[in-house]
Image (cartoon, grey):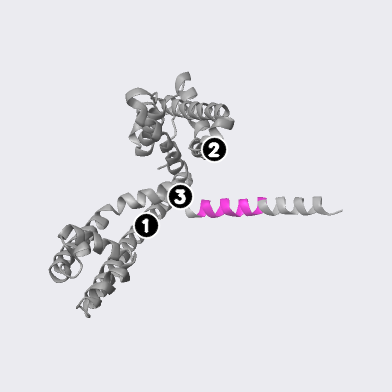
Amino acid sequence: MTPTPIQAQPGDPVAKIRARVGAWVESVPVQRLVIAVIVANAITLGLQTSDDIMRAAGGVIHALDVVFLWIFVMELACKLFARGWAYFTDGWNVFDFLVVAIALVPASGPFSVLRALRVLRVLRLVSAVPQLRFIVTTLLAAIPGIASIGALLAIIFYVGAVMATELFGAASPEHFGTIGESLFTLFQMMTLDSWAAVVRPIMDNGYPAAWVFFVLFIVVSALTMLNLFVAVIIDTMQNLTKAREGTAEQRAGDDAADSTPPPRAEPAGLTDAQLAAELVAVRARLDVLATALERRQQP
């Protein structure tokens, strides 16, 4: 979502300052700097997980972490000053605010668990890069379709678990002894993780045709249902892309319409003969000007 620029009111110096601050903090160089700081902060957060590196350069890493945090705070303060309460109308701005606010809470005592949440600052890269932001928006818009497919997949899992428990519970109680164990085993088979190692002992234990059930389940769950998830996401992304293009074309058309000068009004009170006489006079004047121009161009 593109931030709405602050419009400065004539004669209001505070509004002019807010507009300038907003334009500066949303400018391309500043946003590139913020992205670079987010990447650098992600690297320092990863280095803090190494005891050897922290013993060798822990002071420098902690100092860099503080500098990065205050850069985020300054960026957030500039946006709040420029946009006021309108800043919180954008969900991505609320996300950035919460991430920075969590980082400011002292990670000690009962809040020591928040120390692990500092890595959430890396997620600010999603809100800073438009392409990543568009992908996340697509995933959120695809939730209704994904939920429907997930419900259908849950039904298939439940039916398959009941059938597997009834059919193969005695042959492989460690895998299909209960519905819970059957659900876990079927999920493992959907991921194609060592599914043959589960099926072969059952086939050798008096169920030679057991492969038919499991192959059908894998085809339906892994090869069909999971591809439906991908199809829903791709369809949502295409729809959002078309909507964005349509909005851009409409804005371009509105801008072109606003910039087009109004048609020149025809002089009132003139007869056709008078208009023809004026046209002849204009043509004669143009001929005189063309002749003068040709004489100047001659050496």
Question: Residue extending furthest right?
Answer: 299
Q: Disc 1 designates what residue?
A: 237
| Magenta residues, start to end | 273-285
Disc 3 element: helix
Asked where in the image residue 224 lies, by quadrant, the reply is: bottom left
Left or right, 151 with respect to 111, comes to left
Say which of marks 2 and 3 sits in front.
2
Disc 1 element: helix
Q: CA distance from mark 1 to mark 2?
A: 30 Å
Q: Is residue 49 magenta?
A: no
Q: Residue at x 44, y 34 (%)?
A: 5
Marked residue nearer the N-terminal end (1 or 2): 2
Disc 2 element: helix
List x then y, in percent, for residue 124: 44, 39
Q: Disc 3 designates what residue?
A: 131
Q: Is residue 280 magenta?
A: yes
Marked residue nearer the N-terminal end (1 or 3): 3
List x then y, in percent, for residue 80: 41, 26
